[in-house]
């Protein structure tokens, strides 16, 4: 109740500002007139008395400011006057204002984008209610999130008062709504999945625990909101509709909320189905297989429960399971990690890269602040006479400093607003971007309140940083000395400060340029790396036959027909199948390998861990994978013959402990099967990470180890794009409803190259921003120094100085600062950019091409920044300068 009258009176004063100013002037004149009348009574003439009265009265401006502060009640009106004064000052120098705003907009925009990525991928990757209480359950021995369905049921039933566990599995299926089925990415979820996640449906209902009543008991499907809007055109009557999933009927029961994207940060599924219907979806049933770790477990801690207590309970449950089922690993222990983060080496590399990007963004901001600080110091030099006059007229130093800080805050807020607006536009574009047409990639980097708050805080902090640069100069200013020395007077030792700030900017720019060149060089090398395959002139044809209605021997027969039909196409030279995924794909299969004489087949006794591929005859020729010893597979390597395998060179070193006679050696699989090595192929890259270490890989005949998923690799002539239509036509002649997805192998490698390409793009952008800041800084210093030394340069020119000597006198300091800053920045860049080796294959900052590129780049930046000042220095006319004096 007390605030309302105050606000009314304050508003009344603002509305009566003109009248108040008039009254204030009249009051001051009245005081002066009283003193003038007194002096006239002592014999002075009226004019002399009035002049003497004004002199004795002193600084009128100071008294008016004090009176306004008292009238405004808290300084709000004073603040508004400072703002109006700062706006007028900036309007007088639009070039300075624009340069400052753009410089800061670049820095604030970069930090907003990077923080939005950190916020989306690290701080709040899933955007779920009470996300801080969601944890993923991983195996401690291998940091893997995979767990079997029976183990999940036992762990969940153990202690419901501590946590509630749910599970999901990412898969794909073919969904038909009356026409040709289309591929959809699905989450096979446990019945309590949505209860643990804590979301409500946008339409209909979600899957519940009561739906889990045994295998194939819940033929229900829940649509994601984006899939509902695109595939079903936001049909509100979709609930109750029956669709086909892998040739089986499923009833739509609901639609997820608009902003729910599942429980994997990068991946947004199209539909959700109960995991108990796995047999209808995948053509296989692992619900009773305790050794099949196909589910990702996560849980929500109950209120008041700490992660330590939940982990202790999980480990106690693991100990019980190990005793009940001794064939499991004797160390069945678990880890708890924040859901959506830290589940794979890629996540760790992403976290490290985001941290590095954050550091680079901060460097951009520091460089911008150093640049603006230098500009403000130079601006203070140019305004030295104005400041001195104000001080001589009675203005307080605190008031002047407050006005300078107000000007800095205005620039910072304007630059922050422009930068944030640009960042928001860029982030919305990235969120809508789909880098892979076949994958529903989800980039959780949409800006939220945190991003806006951080942008505001960075803007205000920046204002304090660069606005404080001239304060020390002003506090030491002597109005008498400034006015006596004339308009070119300076505040003292500011040139050294500006040079130091410029050196900081240049060093930061060199760090950014080094990092970007390291990334570019690493990506170039990765494109020419030895992959163990040759993706050029090769096509990948994906067709999951089991969901298409084929079973058992029908699958093998259909694949043989598909291969024969493809080989009959003119221009096709080789074809073969590989499953479950081709090398370098986003997805792979692996397993333990045991010695030939092993009897204890628990995971801890394995001799190595190996990637697993199932291939048909012709695959190695189609993939151009060299066989270095032994043979490949033939049609005789079927279920009726002995188990055989082709392994790579790393497998020989790690599993067979022999590099001389691997052919004919045996090893065992976790199920006890004894497998003979019949061939050895070259090492290559297998997972979607070019920076991976050499991995063991084993290839089994597809006829001996059937896979429900397999891709056909087709080797063609030079014009690979022209084979798309013939292949689709030939295969649809075999089965018109056969679901197909055809792409070049190079396109499929986009997944493996996505991370390094994004690293190159991000670091290239930061390098460009650093270059902009450095160019403006060098240009500002050179131009300001030249403006103060024009008379000196004119005299030098008149005395016969050569052009090089004039340039050295005008720009020598700027180039010295450029050289020192570049050297320091290059050394720091060599140390900092070593982090890129975790993300960009073969990235190294010690590459001579990188070092030469940084030197040439910084020299080019210096030439661009000093081009205009150099031309102005060479165009100095001594006669004109002397006439001006």
Image (tube, rainbow, N blue to C red):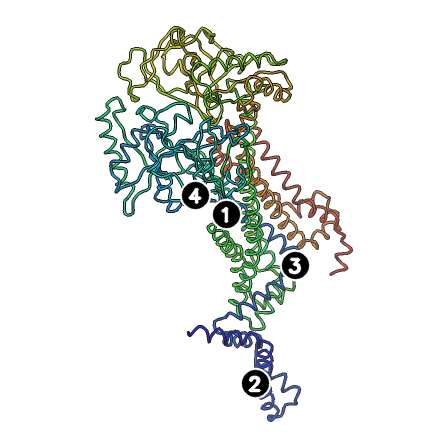
What residue would you read off at disc 1?
A: 447
882 or 687: which is nearer to us? Answer: 687
62 or 677: which is nearer to us? Answer: 677
Q: Is residue 619 above or below residue 810?
A: above
- Regarding residue 267, the answer to whether it shows in the image is no
Dot in front, 4 or 1 = 4
What residue would you read off at disc 2?
A: 31
Contact (CB < 8 A) between labels 3 and 2? no
Residue 61 lies in what quarter of the image?
bottom right
Cα separation, mark 1 vs mark 3, equals: 34 Å
Cα separation, mark 2 vs mark 4, equals: 81 Å
87 or 153: which is nearer to us? Answer: 153
What residue would you read off at disc 3?
A: 93
The residue shown at (55%, 34%) is 435
Dot in front, 2 or 1 = 1
- The mark found on residue 204 in the picture is 4
Does residue 310 appear to the left or right of 702 in the view shown? left
């Amino acid at each position: 109740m007390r605030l309302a009258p105050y606000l009314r009176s304050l508003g009344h004063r603002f509305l009566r500002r003109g009248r108040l100013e008039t009254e204030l002037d009249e009051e001051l004149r009245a005081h002066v007139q009283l003193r003038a009348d007194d002096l006239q009574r002592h014999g002075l003439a009226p004019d002399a008395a009035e002049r003497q009265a004004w002199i004795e009265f002193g600084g009128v401006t100071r008294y008016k400011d004090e009176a306004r502060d008292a009238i405004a009640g808290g300084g709000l009106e004073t603040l508004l006057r400072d703002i109006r004064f700062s706006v007028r000052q900036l309007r007088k120098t639009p070039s300075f204002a624009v340069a400052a705003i753009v410089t800061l907009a670049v820095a604030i925009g970069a930090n907003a984008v990077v923080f939005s990525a950190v916020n989306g991928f690290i701080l709040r990757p899933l955007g779920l209610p009470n996300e801080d209480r969601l944890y993923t359950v991983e195996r401690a021995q291998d940091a893997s999130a995979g767990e079997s369905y029976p183990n999940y049921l036992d762990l969940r039933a153990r202690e419901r008062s501590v946590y509630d566990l749910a599970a999901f599995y990412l898969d794909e299926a073919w969904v038909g709504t009356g026409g040709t089925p289309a591929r959809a990415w699905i989450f096979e979820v446990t019945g309590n999945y949505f209860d643990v996640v804590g979301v409500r449906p946008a339409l209909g209902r979600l899957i519940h625990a009561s739906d889990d009543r045994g295998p194939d008991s819940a033929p229900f499907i829940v649509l994601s909101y984006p899939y509902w809007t695109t595939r079903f055109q936001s049909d509100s009557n979709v609930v109750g509709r029956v669709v086909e999933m892998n040739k089986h009927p499923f009833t739509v029961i609901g639609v997820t909320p608009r902003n729910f994207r599942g429980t994997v940060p990068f991946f947004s599924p199209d539909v959700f189905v109960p995991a108990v219907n796995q047999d209808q979806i995948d053509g296989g049933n692992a619900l009773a297989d305790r050794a099949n770790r196909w589910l990702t477990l996560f849980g929500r801690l109950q209120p008041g429960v700490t992660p330590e207590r939940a982990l202790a309970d999980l480990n106690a449950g693991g100990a019980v399971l190990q005793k009940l089922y001794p064939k499991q690993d004797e160390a069945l222990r678990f880890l708890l990690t924040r859901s959506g983060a830290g589940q794979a080496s890629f996540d760790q590399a992403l976290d490290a890269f985001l941290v590095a990007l954050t550091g680079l963004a901060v460097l951009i901001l520091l460089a911008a602040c150093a640049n603006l600080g230098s500009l403000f110091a130079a601006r203070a030099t140019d305004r030295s006479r104005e400041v001195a006059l104000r001080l001589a007229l009675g203005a307080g130093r605190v008031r002047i400093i407050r006005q300078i800080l107000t000007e800095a805050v205005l620039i910072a807020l304007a630059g922050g607003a422009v930068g944030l607006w640009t960042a928001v536009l860029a982030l919305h574009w990235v969120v809508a971007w789909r880098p892979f047409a076949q994958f529903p990639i989800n980039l959780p980097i949409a800006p939220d309140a945190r991003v806006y708050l951080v942008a505001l805080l960075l803007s205000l902090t920046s204002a304090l940083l660069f606005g404080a640069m001239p304060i020390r100069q002003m506090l030491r200013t002597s109005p008498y000395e400034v006015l006596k020395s004339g308009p070119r007077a300076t505040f003292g030792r500011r040139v050294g400060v500006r040079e130091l700030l410029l050196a900081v900017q240049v060093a930061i720019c060199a760090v950014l340029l080094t990092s970007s060149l390291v990334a570019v060089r690493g990506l170039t090398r990765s494109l020419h790396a030895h992959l163990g395959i040759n993706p050029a002139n090769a096509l990948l044809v994906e067709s999951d036959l089991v969901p298409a209605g084929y079973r058992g021997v029908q699958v093998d027969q259909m694949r043989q027909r598909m291969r024969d039909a493809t080989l009959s196409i003119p221009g096709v030279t080789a074809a073969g199948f590989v499953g479950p995924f081709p090398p370098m794909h986003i997805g792979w299969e692996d397993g333990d390998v045991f010695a030939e004489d092993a009897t204890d087949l628990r995971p801890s006794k394995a001799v190595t861990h190996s990637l697993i591929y199932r291939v048909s005859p012709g695959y190695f020729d189609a993939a151009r994978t060299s066989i270095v010893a032994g043979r490949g597979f033939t049609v005789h390597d079927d279920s009726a013959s002995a188990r055989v395998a082709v392994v790579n060179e790393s497998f020989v070193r790690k599993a067979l402990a022999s590099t001389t006679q691997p052919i004919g050696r045996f090893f065992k699989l976790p199920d006890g099967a004894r497998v003979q090595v019949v061939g050895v192929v070259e090492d290559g890259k297998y997972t979607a990470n070019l920076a991976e270490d050499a991995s063991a890989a084993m290839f089994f005949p597809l006829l001996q180890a059937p896979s429900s998923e397999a891709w056909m690799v087709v080797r063609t002539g030079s014009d690979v794009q022209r084979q798309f239509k013939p292949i689709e036509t030939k295969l649809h002649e075999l089965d018109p409803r056969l679901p197909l997805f055809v792409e070049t192998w190079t396109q499929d490698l986009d997944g493996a190259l996505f991370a390094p390409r994004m690293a190159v793009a991000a670091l290239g952008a930061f390098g460009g921003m650093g270059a902009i800041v450095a160019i403006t800084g060098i240009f500002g210093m050179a131009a300001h120094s030249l403006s103060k030394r024009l008379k000196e340069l004119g005299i030098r020119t008149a005395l016969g100085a050569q052009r090089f000597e004039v340039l050295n006198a005008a720009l020598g300091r700027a180039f010295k600062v450029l050289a020192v800053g570049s050297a320091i920045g290059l050394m720091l860049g060599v140390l900092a950019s070593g982090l890129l080796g975790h993300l960009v294959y073969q990235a190294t900052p010690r590459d001579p091409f990188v070092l030469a590129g940084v030197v040439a780049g910084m020299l080019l930046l210096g030439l661009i920044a000093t081009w205009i000042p150099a031309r102005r220095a060479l165009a100095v006319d001594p006669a004109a300068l002397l006439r001006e004096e």
